[in-house]
Amino acid sequence: MTEHNDHDLEERFHALRRADAAAAPPFHTTLAAARVRGAGKPRRRTLGLAAAVVIASVAVALLLTRRGAPSDLATIRLKTPTDFLLTLPNEQLLRTVPALGRASVTGFTTIDLHRRTP
């Protein structure tokens, strides 16, 4: 680009700026419109208050319904219809621990079934 082209480009940008400035509303008009829109804040407050009331009521409802639920998950025993698929032949041998050093098979110690996980 030559200096002549740069000067022409500068004049074009100035013309665009002047056209934008002529189309823009005066600052005082924009400020007055913003003040009028600010008058709608009580409606927002009302909506915010209504949302807070709904959230609080849902929280209270959840707290009241959870009172009857067990708090210890170890006490819950789940019995599903497919539990029979998990049973193995001679399963009692898997629940027993042989005493080391003994030759007899009858000296097994059993594991408590309530400690098993579902």
Image (spheres, rainbow, N blue to C red):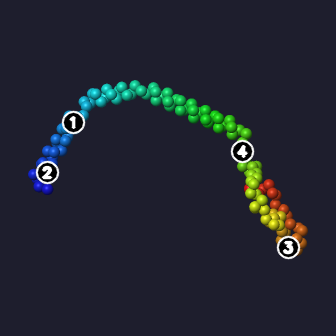
- Image point 24% across, 34% down: which residue? 24
Q: Residue at x 71, y 38 (%)?
A: 67
In percent of the image, x 73 and y 39: which residue is there? 68
Q: Is residue 54 left or right of residue 106?
A: left
Q: Earlier in the sequence, mark 4 or mark 3?
A: 4
Residue 30 position by quadrant: top left
As helix, strand or loop, the secondary structure at mark 4 comes to: loop
Res. 40 visible in picture: yes
- Distance between the Cα atoms at labels 3 and 1? 100 Å
Q: Are marks 4 and 2 in contact (CB under 8 Å)?
A: no
| Numbered label attached to residue 46 | none
Q: Is residue 8 left or right of residue 43?
A: left
What residue would you read off at disc 3? 101
Q: Residue furthest front?
A: 81
Q: Depth-wise, is mark 4 or mark 2 nearer the camera?
A: 2
Question: Dividing the picture into quarters, in which one does residue 21 lie?
Answer: top left
**Residue position for label 4:** 71
Which mark is in front, 3 or 1?
Answer: 1
Which-is-in-front pick, marks 4 and 1?
A: 1
Mark 4 and 1 residues: CB-CB less than 8 Å, in contact?
A: no
Three-letter amino acid code of the residue under disc 4: Ser
